[in-house]
Amino acid sequence: MDNELIQGLQERINILLKDPLLNDISEKQSLQDIDTLIAIEQGHAYRIQVDRNPLDPVYVVVRQASTVQQLKKLIRLELERMEPQNKHVSWKYIWRSYCLILQGQRLIDDKAVMSQLGIRQNSVLRFSRLGHQKGQHRKAWYWYR
């Protein structure tokens, strides 16, 4: 009985994999990846591009209710997946020194929600060096603190 159930399930999976509407889904995608694709199709998530001139851009998918902090984590995970390195990248240093920019607006508030910032499908974010405004310098950051 279990063998028949497994064969029936395998046949249904093969039928789904051959469906032309599902040709952008590979066999190795996880359930979370499929949920993300469904959210994009339903309009609950956005596929955005993070421009890293002169390097290749990074593409991430964020939900409407995601925060900037969650976006930063997705960028970190995607970069680690794209470019596995032996050397350590200090993300704390990167986010202290750089910020993301959307249409000239700096995304500094980590608790801001994506949908309220004006991020839409296929938006392009850029990395920008954080400059200091006059009279608002931070104190030096030392390793021994």
Image (cartoon, rainbow, N blue to C red):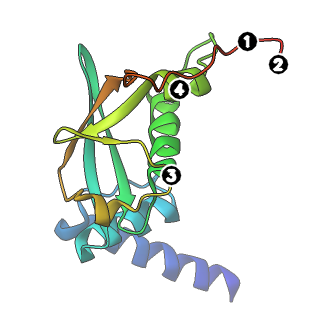
- What is the spatial separation of the Cα atoms under label 4 and label 3, in whole angstroms? 16 Å
Kind of element beneath mark 2? loop
Q: Amino acid at mark 3?
A: Gln
Kind of element beneath mark 3? helix
Look at mark 1 in the image and give the residue it sits on: 142
Q: Is residue 7 left or right of residue 102?
A: right
Q: Amino acid at mark 4?
A: Arg
Q: Position of residue 144 (x, y in %)?
A: 83, 12
Look at mark 3 in the image and give the residue it sits on: 70
Look at mark 2 in the image and give the residue it sits on: 145
- What is the spatial separation of the Cα atoms under label 1 and label 2, in whole angstroms? 6 Å
The circle drawn on residue 96 is: 4
Q: Amino acid at mark 1?
A: Tyr
Residue furthest right as drawn:
144
Mark 4: few/some/many CA within 10 Å (<14, 14-19, 20+)? few
Mark 2: few/some/many CA within 10 Å (<14, 14-19, 20+)? few
- What is the spatial separation of the Cα atoms under label 3 and label 1, in whole angstroms? 27 Å
State which mark lies toward you, 3 or 2: 2
User: Earlier along the polypeptide chain: callout 3 or callout 1?
Assistant: 3
Quadrant placement of the C terminus: top right
State which mark lies toward you, 3 or 1: 1
Tell me the quarter of the picture where residue 53 sits: top left
Of residue 88 and residue 139, the one placed in the foreground of this image is: 139
State which mark lies toward you, 1 or 4: 1
- What is the spatial separation of the Cα atoms under label 1 and label 4, in whole angstroms? 13 Å
Task: Identify which residue is drawn at 44% across, 59% down.
Answer: 33
User: Earlier along the polypeptide chain: callout 2 or callout 4?
Assistant: 4
Kind of element beneath mark 1? loop
Tag 1 near tag 2, CB within 8 Å: yes
